[in-house]
Amino acid sequence: MATEEKQEEDQAMEPEETKEAKEPEPPKELETDAGKAQPFLKAGQCCFLTEDTTMNVLPTVNGKLLMALGDGGFQYLLAGARANVGIKAGRYFFEVMIAEVKNLAEPQGRAPGPKPKHLVRVGVSTSSSGLLLGPEETESVSFDSSGCFINGPKKELISKKFTHSQVAGVLVNLDPKSPNANTISLFVNGERACEPKPIPESMKGKALFPAVSFRNVTLQVHFGATLLRSLPFTCHSWLQVQKSHSEVKSAVVPKDGKYEVLLPVGLPDEGTFDWVDQFLSKNKNYTELSDRAIIDWANKSGLQKYGGSYRRSSNDKPE
């Protein structure tokens, strides 16, 4: 009896933390409060130019909302957009919120579309990168709504998902004095969702532009000085960028107001598309509209050819 009573006393004296394992404390936030800003941009000057969006993007509300075509097969294609203000130094923040989720019917009797049906990618890219923030791009980094970080072909699960009405914020830190220098971070509803991720070497020294890619949703993109969700520290928004830290791209507008359409004519498989590739590399403000361009777009959007691979027997009329 005396032994049993002593065991009970010992158990009662055990500290609570030995009975219940403590949850690990989150890492200390290394980002500090920002100093005074000297912005030079006015409201609305940070925006999405038409030449830096895919053909299915529909900007509304003065560019504050981004929608995409959703009929006739467009519901399967990713939409992409890149802003016109990039940063080369400093630390700046922008936000994206899924304002609407669209549930579009799929045609019966056909193979199902790419998964997930609703997808958002948010990050930064250089001016020479593609618009879809996919694994085929080497000069873009992004976070997607499923909680993954995409850096070229590398894709890793690093955080929880963000969904409808949640605000995903992206912090880009290029301040060499900061312990988080040359990193990009994701915040969801003002709380850090992952540890800072390093920006690839190939992107260092180049202007980094906010970029989004999405499917079957409507996005609210916010660059303004007043954040949608407050952070644990003060930070300058993208609209508050200093002139010396920024690179601003202007829209290419013809002098006579008339835009040009080119129709290359050539013999089948005799170098026509080689000429097109060379032309597009020197004229970034043109967009190719062809069978091969649509197939490439579908492939990057996750569509797979039914019954086989994307092997082509002709560039002019690919299967």
Image: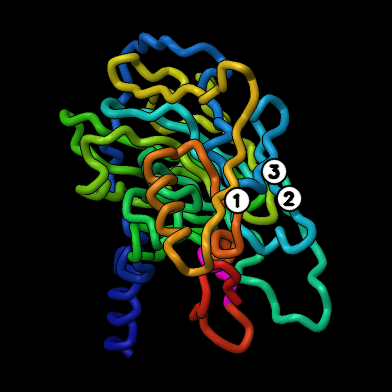
Q: Nearer the viewer, residue 301 or 44?
A: 301
Q: Nearer the viewer, residue 13 or 19?
A: 19
Q: Nearer the viewer, residue 296 or 304?
A: 296
Question: In the rendered image of this protein, does residue 177 appear above or below residue 100?
Answer: above
Q: State the residue position of label 3.
A: 67
Inter-mark Cα distance, 2 to 1:
9 Å
**Disc 3 secondary structure class:** strand
- Based on the picture, tell me whether residue 300 belongs to the magenta stretch: yes
Q: State the residue position of label 2.
A: 69
Q: State the residue position of label 1.
A: 79
Q: Which mark is residue 147?
A: none
**Disc 2 secondary structure class:** loop
Tag 2: Cα neighbours inside 10 Å, few (<14), some, or many (≥20)?
Answer: some
Residue furthest left as drawn: 177
Task: Check if mark 1's residue and mark 3's residue have beta carbons within 8 Å.
Answer: no
**Disc 1 secondary structure class:** strand
Tag 1: Cα neighbours inside 10 Å, few (<14), some, or many (≥20)?
Answer: many
Q: Which residues are magenta?
A: 299-304
Q: Amino acid at mark 1?
A: Ala
Q: Quadrant of the N terminus?
A: bottom left
Question: In the rendered image of this protein, does residue 32 appear above or below residue 68?
Answer: above
Question: In the rendered image of this protein, does residue 88 appear above or below residue 67?
Answer: above
